[in-house]
Image (cartoon, helix red, strand yellow):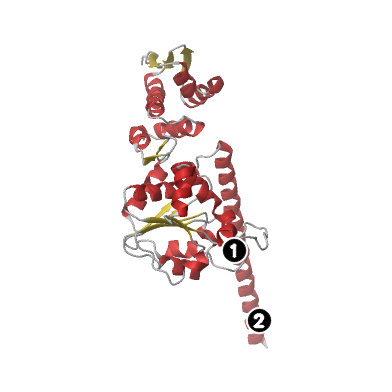
Amino acid sequence: MREKEPVEKVIYFEDQKEAYSLLGGRDEFIRVFQENFDCQMVSRGDRLEILGAPEEAGAAAHVLEELQYLYRQGTQITMHEVRYGIQLEKRGEGEVLHKLFSDTILVTAKGRHVRPKTLGQRVYLEAIRRNSITFGIGPAGTGKTYLAVVMAVAALRTKEVNKIILTRPAVEAGERLGFLPGDLQDKVDPYLRPLYDALQDILGLDMYQKFMARGIIEIAPLAYMRGRTLEDAFIILDEAQNTTDKQMKMFLTRLGFGSRMVVTGDLGQVDLPRGVTSGLRQASEILDGVEGIGIVRLAPLDVIRHDVVTRIVKAYGAYEEQQKKQREQRQARRRRQYGERAEAAAESEVKA
């Protein structure tokens, strides 16, 4: 059978800046493409030539065309977009790239278009749109908090809600900070810094300060939520893995008319004392399937930080799974030994 002749695909660039953005510094993106597709890529000024088998060259060209579309929509191309686009193409899901990359949620104060960067993130955003309460559970770097803030600002802009309420349990990650000076906001600021950073990035510093001064953005420590009914508000509970079961139930029952809640957390980073049940873990089990509540579990594939972060998350996940299996084996061995001793004692009594 005759082998298929190599074919050439050509991608044309508008200028050198576009070529640099799509090919990466020192052609680092080209190397990733050539590692994943059986093709050769040659950059020639205003164009990129792709030579290889029809399926391979076509697949590589399709990903590059989608990245080019994304770049022309105002998004900076990073290694994440390149690797994720390649992964989808190789899994036979390349057709969803265009829709994924073209779904703009809002435009930040600096003109940056915010879009879901993975299929998991798109599912998460759709769940927030559909449900009154949404749980976003997943490892660090999956965009749980940032996208929740984006959706809150989008709802505020369209007047679906009148205010944004941010809250988070004040639990340190394995260290004691002691008594912090200042008023209530000064005391909770260190815990809510990721939410502040996201709001400032989206709104701009001036608008952020204006909304804070007018109470449109409210900071409410979790302990202060008891007794309130939150209406016409978008409420975000961050780091929810560090809530207790009672705190979580109290928080969820604050939901009022016209409000939406997003609860985010990473069950791999629980900082509660040993023996204390995580409210996030319990709620995600109890409320699974309840109408009006969405539970989205993001995976290491949805991590959009440095590549090494994804590998760290996977390594820790594998280690924790191994530790869990070893604990289960030890418990099974102890139960077996206890059963054997009980049998032996029963036999001794019969003989006696």
* Residue 167 visible to the viewer: yes
Residue at image position (50%, 50%) is 195
Query: Which quarter of the picture shows residue 52?
Result: top left
Helix, strand or loop at label 1? It is loop
What residue is pinned by disc 2? 345
Precedes in sequence: disc 2 or disc 1 = 1
Rendered location of residue 119, percent (x, y): 39, 42
| CA separation in Å, label 2 and label 1 | 41 Å
The amino acid on which the numbered mark 1 sits, given as a three-letter code, is: Leu
Rendered location of residue 43, percent (x, y): 48, 14
Q: Nearer the viewer, residue 310 or 336?
A: 310
- Look at the picture and state if 68 lies above or below 263: above
> Badge 2: few (under 14), some or many (20 or more) residues near its Cα, within 10 Å?
few
Name, please, the residue furthest toward the bottom.
352
The amino acid on which the numbered mark 2 sits, given as a three-letter code, is: Ala
* Residue 144 visible to the viewer: no
- Look at the picture and state if 53 lies above or below 338: above
| Left or right of 131 on screen, residue 252 | right
What residue is pinned by disc 1? 272
Query: Which quarter of the picture shows residue 47?
Result: top left
